[in-house]
Image (cartoon, helix red, strand yellow):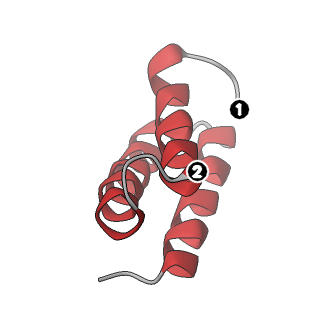
Amino acid sequence: MAHPETLTTENNLAITLLRLGEFAEARVLLEHAVKARSRLLGSDHPDTLEARDSLAWPSSGASA
């Protein structure tokens, strides 16, 4: 099981990749972060919701 701070770092790296336009790589990290945070913290935890929000960026075409 991943440590919450490790998942935060993973999420932050994914956001950086989004800003660089590396959407495919970011998506892999964000999908992992959402799954892991859901298991560890619960699906309604603010950190899980943050990861889900970040995961929507590549899908929406919004700029980071």
Q: Earlier in the sequence, mark 2 or mark 1?
A: 2
Tell which of 1 and 44 is nearer to you. Answer: 44
In x, y percent, where is residue 33? 41, 58
User: Against 58, is 13 above or below?
Assistant: below
Residue with the mark numbered 2: 46
Q: Position of residue 27 (x, y in %)?
A: 40, 43
Residue at the location (58% across, 51% down)?
46
**Circle 2 or circle 1, nearest the eye:** 2
Residue 10 vertical position relative to residue 29 in the rendered view, above or below: below
Q: Disc number at residue 9?
A: none
Tag 1: residue type? Ala
Q: Residue at x 55, y 58 (%)?
A: 11
For label 1, the crowd category at 10 Å Cα-Cα, with few meaning under 14, some 14 to 19 and many 20 or more, is: few
Pointer 1 residue: 64
Helix or strand or loop: what does disc 1 sit on? loop
Cα–Cα span, label 2 and label 1 = 19 Å
Q: Front-most of 8 and 41?
A: 41
Amino acid type, residue under disc 2 in the picture:
Pro
Residue found at x 49% / y 70%: 7
Residue 64, how many percent across, how many down? 71, 32
- Could you tell me residue 30's position as x and y percent? 43, 50
Between 10 and 16, the residue placed more toward the observer is: 10
Q: How many marks?
A: 2
Q: Residue at x 47, y 39 (%)?
A: 52
Which quarter of the image is occupied by the N terminus? bottom left
Q: Secondary structure at mark 2?
A: helix
